[in-house]
Amino acid sequence: MKNLLSFFLVIFLIFLNNCSFDRKTGIWKEHNKKIIEEAKSEKKLEKIFKQNKIFDQEIESKDIIVVSEKKENASWLEDNFSQNNDVSHLNYQNNKNSIFKSKKIGKNRRSVENVNLEPLVFEENIFFSDLNGNIYNYSTDSRKLVWKFNFYKKKFKNIPIKTNLKIIPNNLIVSDSLGYFYNIDINTGRLVWARNQGVPLTSEIKSYNEKIFMLNQDNKFYIFEKKNGKKILDFETFPVILKKNNKQTLALDSLDNLYFVTSAGQIFSLNHQNYKINWLKNIRDTGSSDEFGLFYSSPLIVKDNSVFISASQITMSIDSFSGKTNWEIPFGTRIRPVISGRFIFLVSKEGFILNADITSGKIIWSKKLFESKEVNLERMGEITSLFLISDQLFFTTKNGYFFFINYENGEIINYAKVAKGFYSKSAVVNGKIYIIDKNMRILIFN
């Protein structure tokens, strides 16, 4: 009996020795390596956007447009508002009045051309950063700066530093274009911990429970521990030679799946509990890249078992379970779409706006907004963000304009120049619009 037990013990140890459950090696590594290698060899490459013609026709609406109910939100804690990047229909007081303008906060001597920042709003406090590496916590209640934090030494003073921010209760997580990744106590402004990955961290920051997710400039995917920044997992995807300025986008669903888009044009679906890749979709093609061959995209949105994304010349709906394409529209934008009810609203930076059915991709209406002497691209500047607030589409432009649009047909309701230009995109919280102008002043509208 003793010999028999010894025999089974040896067999059991041999089995354990040959089956690794380590998150970076063994079963996990082989499973994902096979999927990535197949994609690299283009065995699973799905050719998209076979048309050459970009959609630019104006269509009048013949349908009844019904959007979802307005939502009240008391904070804006991360890029694109939520874990799944869905900013559907938010409440806005709709008085269209300026109710707050701060003094100039900090100095900004650098170009703001490529800043891709949204102010974060939490309990009457606004968190944002500048290109000198300063992180600010400003109280709109007391109308003063609560704290200012700069992680960087003087040797970096001549280097523009882009940062990504996310609030996790009592913590402000920061990643940057130098490869640093750190945590600031949200109340005191003191550093909790810091790590350096050596390569610029260029994606949005997402989190779930005690895990933090992001990508670096070379499309390497990371999972970190929230409490100390220790790396749990990393793996290589598809590096690119040419680098770009906009952020890679990530989103989570309610089924433990994480989706991210690389700057090489791949969409990954990953289960962040068992660390297995569900599917990988390679959508890089001549129709999804710009004139220099770089892949750009809007923020990825996960909603109703579908993934929605817009690239340079195409907008797609993808089944979130299988990765199969539901529909395609030959129209592209880098601006986050709005999905509400059974409709998706899209706008290009040049001012072409459209509404499509999210089930079929059928275009309901489309409109060219910048077509007159008074309202034109040169005067208004490029469009930078899109919202649906209190039964009207709302967007901001580079040169400091607010526009309100009829969501039923794309007609302009009204517009106004509210600043000389904007440093940030806008956030909508507690029925008010928050934005930072190019003079580094916080503006609030009700």
Image (cartoon, grey):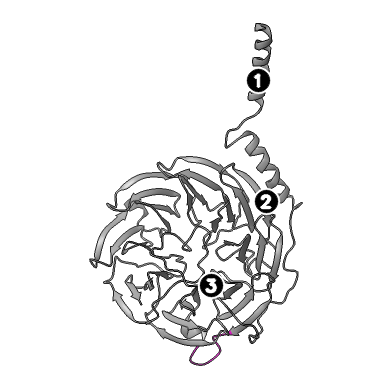
Compare residues 89 and 411 and report the one nearer the observer.
89
Residue 219 place in picture, x, y as percent: 57, 52
Residue bearing the label numbered 3 = 68
Taking the magenta stretch, the answer to whether it contains residue 141 is: no
Q: Is residue 385 above or below residue 418?
A: above
Q: Label 3 is placed on what type of residue?
A: Ser
Looking at the rendered structure, the kind of residue marked 2 is Trp
Nearer to us of marks 3 and 2 is 3
Q: What is the tally of numbered marks visible in this picture?
A: 3
Q: Position of residue 212 (x, y in %)?
A: 47, 48
Location of the N terminus by quadrant is top right
Q: Is tag 1's residue or tag 3's residue first in the polypeptide sequence?
A: 1
- Structural distance between the alpha carbons of marks 1 and 3: 57 Å
Residue 257 drawn above or below residue 368: above
Q: Is residue 73 left or right of residue 290?
A: left
The correct choice, above or below, for 346 with respect to 192 in the image is below
Q: Secondary structure at mark 1?
A: helix
Which residue does the image show at 63% across and 38% down from the upper left?
28
Residue 107 visible in the picture:
yes
Residue 124: quadrant of the picture: bottom left
At a point 52% along the width and 60% down the height, the residue shown is 247
Q: Which of the marked residues, 2 or 1, is nearer the chain's N terminus?
A: 1
Secondary structure type for disc 2: strand
Mark number, residue 12: 1
Q: Looking at the image, is mark 3 or mark 2 earlier in the sequence? A: 3
- Residue 184 in the image, given as x and y percentages of width and height: 34, 50
Q: Residue tagged by mark 2? A: 279
How many angstroms separate mark 2 from mark 1 (CA)? 33 Å
